[in-house]
């Protein structure tokens, strides 16, 4: 255990620091399964040990490969798998067999199965198409979309069908013992920006909160999905706790609080590092007061042209913050330059190995199924 983490927790007198209070932490869904509840408690507990490393679509594809079993760019570079695995449900709502980045949902199910068996952690975002216009998640041509899916809205029934499809998929995620595979569901992310149909300029504060609450209630109560933890993750444009919480749907609807922030080019290095660290201070205040798990839910530098980005930028930005995990975005196999984790021969390969070896970063072998779900 890094002494720094312990000191930090004690200094803040973080309620979740005592085993007793940790045990009293309950998921937003009061009927959540035992493994889901244990996952939440483990996430709280592990913040004292270190920061879990996550990668989007890690098992699905990487640079120069698509879908061979057991391959991962992260593992190819540092010898270990990530602890956290991001996936995206976009296009599941349409009944498509593959997601918006062409990952087949059957494949995703099999990844989820393997990850759970190995004791890893799954998080799923949802780049849902625009239900009103028929466009993509990025179609912001109408500011009526959120309103249209809420009860009484013209797309409400369609939207319920979309949630049914999600629920049906979630219900297929079981292991051999019939235990549901818990996952962190992270819908409507970056909602404080205005590039998705659920974004800030496209709906009112109340509409966003209603959308969130409706989704949670529908999945948990109507569809009896009880293996989800809910992650609230705006973009990083907030400067205070109040601003962070502006569209917060309430403690009964959220298990994790996070944000997404990317370094936009090599020249942003110092700005990015300082900004992330500053925002994590705010985030951790929120997490502490609301007894939620904090995470850097999406980050990265596209292409990672900086050979020392991992230990020179990312680690200094996060190391003094008791967050649960940090997740970098995907290594697209068919979009040159669009990758956020190294691969063999990459300029940041050696530095990533150093990052992996840090006592404060946690990869798969450092956590076990026992410690996470049981
Ligand atoms: C974006 C890009 C897109 C991708 C989308 C959803 O950041 O990576 O290529 O389709 O995420 O995964």
Image (cartoon, grey):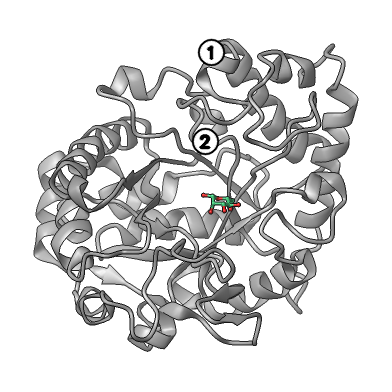
Residue 301 found in image quarter: bottom left
Residue beneath disc 1:
205
Residue beneath disc 2:
254
Tell me: residue 309, above or below residue 44.
below
Q: Residue at x 18, y 37 (%)?
A: 278
Left or right: where does residue 237 sit relative to residue 249? left
Q: How many marks?
A: 2
Q: Are there few (<14), some (14-19), or many (20+) residues within 10 Å of tag 2?
A: many
State yes or no: discs 2 and 1 in contact (Cβ < 8 Å): no
Tell me: residue 274, above or below residue 109.
above
Residue 221 appears at what percent x and percent y?
77, 35
User: Which element carries disc 2, helix, strand or loop?
Assistant: loop
Tell me: residue 42, above or below residue 206.
below
Left or right: where does residue 97 sit relative to residue 238? right
Residue 38 appears at what percent x and percent y?
51, 59
Residue 293 appears at what percent x and percent y?
39, 46
Q: Residue at x 75, y 39 (%)?
A: 219
Label 2 residue near ligand 1, CB within 8 Å: no
- Residue 8 is marked as none
Residue 18 appears at what percent x and percent y?
27, 51
Distance from label 2 to label 1 (Cα)?
Answer: 16 Å
User: Which element carries disc 1, helix, strand or loop?
Assistant: helix
N-terminal of the two: label 2 or label 1?
1
**For this rendering, which residue is in front, 28 or 364?**
364
Query: Quarter of the image containing the N terminus?
Result: bottom left
**For this rendering, which residue is in front, 286 or 178?**
286
Residue 310 found in image quarter: bottom left
Left or right: where does residue 364 sit relative to residue 359? right
Q: Residue at x 70, y 65 (%)?
A: 103
Q: Residue at x 25, y 81 (%)?
A: 353
Residue 114 found in image quarter: bottom right
């Amino acid at each position: 255990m890094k002494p720094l983490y312990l000191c930090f927790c004690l200094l803040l007198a973080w309620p979740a620091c005592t085993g007793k209070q940790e045990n009293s932490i309950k998921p937003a869904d009061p009927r959540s399964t035992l493994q889901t509840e244990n996952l939440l408690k483990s996430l709280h507990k592990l913040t004292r040990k270190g920061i879990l490393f996550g990668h989007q679509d890690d098992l699905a594809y990487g640079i120069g490969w698509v879908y061979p079993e057991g391959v991962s760019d992260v593992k190819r570079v540092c010898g270990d798998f990530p602890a956290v695995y991001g996936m995206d449900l976009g296009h599941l709502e349409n009944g498509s067999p593959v997601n918006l980045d062409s990952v087949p949902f059957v494949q995703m199910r099999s990844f989820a199965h393997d990850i759970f068996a190995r004791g890893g952690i799954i998080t799923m975002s949802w780049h849902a198409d625009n239900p009103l216009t028929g466009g993509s998640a990025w179609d912001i041509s109408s500011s009526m979309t959120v309103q249209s899916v809420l009860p009484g809205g013209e797309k409400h029934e369609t939207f319920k069908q979309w949630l049914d499809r999600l629920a049906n998929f979630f219900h297929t995620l079981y292991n051999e013992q019939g235990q549901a595979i818990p996952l962190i569901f992270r819908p409507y992310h970056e909602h404080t920006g205005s590039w998705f149909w659920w974004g800030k300029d496209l709906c009112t504060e109340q509409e966003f909160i209603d959308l969130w609450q409706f989704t949670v209630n529908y999945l948990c109560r109507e569809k009896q999905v009880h293996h989800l933890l809910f992650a609230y993750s705006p973009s990083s444009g907030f400067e205070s706790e109040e601003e962070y919480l502006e569209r917060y749907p309430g403690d009964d609807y959220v298990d994790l609080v996070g944000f997404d922030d990317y370094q936009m080019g090599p020249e942003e290095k110092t700005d990015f590092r300082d900004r992330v660290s500053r925002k994590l201070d705010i985030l951790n205040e929120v997490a502490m007061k609301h007894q939620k798990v904090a995470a850097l839910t999406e980050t990265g530098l596209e292409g990672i042209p900086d050979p020392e980005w991992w230990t020179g930028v990312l680690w200094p930005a996060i190391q003094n913050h008791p967050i649960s995990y940090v997740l970098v975005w995907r290594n697209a196999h068919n979009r040159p330059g669009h990758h956020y984790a190294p691969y063999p021969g990459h300029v940041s390969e050696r530095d990533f190995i150093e990052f992996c070896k840090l006592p404060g970063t946690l990869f798969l072998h450092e956590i076990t199924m026992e410690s996470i779900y049981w």
